[in-house]
């Protein structure tokens, strides 16, 4: 028999020290970390220490070392079974392919979820906000050439540079707005990138907050309009010549470089 609990050999008679000593009994094959268990109603036996990261569980009425994966697989395989740890359910695992979205299944499968995948999942499913929840934009922008708001990727009809205002021409492309004529109005967006070549696509701010420390140098509270003298430029002076178009773009809201951009599509022509 192996692993049994047995007396050590001490000779014919036991001294008191031998009787009381800790070496009077031992397991067959005993090693550090081993545990004792009752292998029957009359026999004590040794269970060798388990491998690293294994858990002692009961199988067939005796303790057995098993991996966490094997234990959880057993729990989830029981019909209607539920295993709670600190009130959290860790058993009764279901296949996410049957009742979860693809994005959730991917995270379940490999525990990775990139920004691109998150955006793709949101775009595919749409976004619904619960009552009292909101999408927050940042007004007090701390860095030069930054923005926060609603943007769109649009195609340029000509070369466009940062902070230039654009209108949509009848070719569906973005061109520099100027208020000296109705044909180059109204401005609907401001370009947020560095430079955009003709026919290239770039990101334009449609509504929100915009900061530019060199070009936008207005007084706090100034109303902003499309310039009548410089194509694509902001101005804090109303157009005043006959035939010119007045369009309110927004307001210098914080300091002298941060504007609230909310272009009105209503134009007033100077008579």
Image: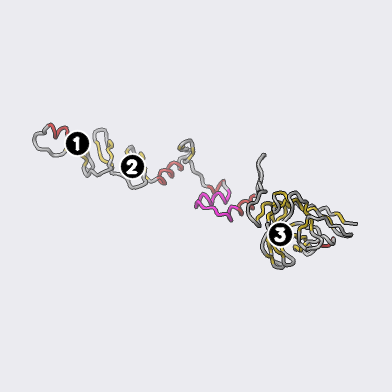
Q: Position of residue 137 (x, y in %)?
A: 66, 48
Q: Nearer the viewer, residue 109 or 24?
A: 24
The dominant secondary structure in magenta is helix
Q: Nearer the viewer, mark 1 or mark 2?
A: 1
Is residue 109 rendered magenta in the image? Answer: yes
Q: Position of residue 74 (x, y in %)?
A: 42, 43
C-alpha gap between disc 1 and disc 3: 88 Å
| 256 vs 22: above or below | below
Badge 3 is on which residue? 215
Quadrant location of the N terminus? top left
Q: Nearer the viewer, mark 1 or mark 3?
A: 3
State the residue at coordinates (33%, 47%). Answer: 51
C-alpha gap between disc 1 and disc 2: 27 Å
| 155 vs 58: above or below | below
State the residue at coordinates (9%, 34%). Answer: 13
Q: Nearer the viewer, mark 2 or mark 3?
A: 3
Badge 1 is on which residue? 22
Q: Nearer the viewer, residue 12 or 134?
A: 134
Q: Position of residue 22 (x, y in %)?
A: 19, 36
C-alpha gap between disc 2 and disc 3: 74 Å
Say whether disc 1 or disc 2 marks the residue closer to the N-terminus. 1
What is the secondary structure assignment of the residue under circle 3?
loop
Badge 2 is on which residue? 64
Residues in magenta, as a range: 101-118
Categorize mark 3 by other alpha carbons within 10 Å: few (<14), some (14-19), many (20+). Answer: some
What is the secondary structure assignment of the residue under circle 2?
strand
State the residue at coordinates (50%, 52%). Answer: 110
């Amino acid at each position: 028999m192996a692993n049994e609990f047995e007396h050590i050999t001490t000779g014919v008679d036991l001294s008191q020290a031998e009787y009381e000593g800790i070496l009077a009994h031992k397991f067959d094959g005993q090693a550090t970390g081993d545990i004792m268990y009752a292998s029957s109603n009359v026999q004590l036996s040794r269970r060798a220490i388990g491998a690293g990261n294994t858990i002692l569980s009961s199988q067939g009425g005796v303790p057995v070392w098993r991996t966490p994966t094997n234990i959880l697989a057993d729990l989830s395989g029981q019909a209607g079974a539920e295993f709670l740890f600190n009130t959290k359910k860790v058993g009764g695992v279901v296949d996410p392919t049957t009742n979860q979205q693809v994005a959730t299944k991917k995270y379940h499968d490999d525990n990775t979820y990139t920004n691109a995948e998150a955006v793709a999942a949101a775009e595919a499913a749409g976004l619904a906000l619960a009552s009292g929840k909101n999408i927050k934009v940042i007004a007090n922008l701390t860095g030069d050439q930054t923005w926060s708001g609603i943007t769109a990727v649009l195609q340029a009809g000509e070369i466009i540079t940062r902070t230039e205002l654009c209108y949509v021409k009848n070719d569906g492309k973005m061109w520099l707005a100027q208020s000296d004529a109705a044909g180059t109005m109204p401005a609907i967006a401001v370009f947020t990138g560095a430079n955009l070549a003709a026919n290239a696509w770039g990101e334009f701010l449609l509504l929100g907050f915009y900061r530019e420390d060199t070009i936008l140098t207005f007084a706090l509270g100034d109303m902003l309009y499309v310039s009548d003298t410089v194509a694509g430029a902001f101005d804090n002076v109303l157009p005043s010549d006959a035939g010119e178009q007045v369009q309110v773009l927004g307001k210098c809201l914080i300091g002298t470089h941060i504007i609230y951009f909310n272009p009105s599509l209503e134009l007033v022509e100077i008579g």
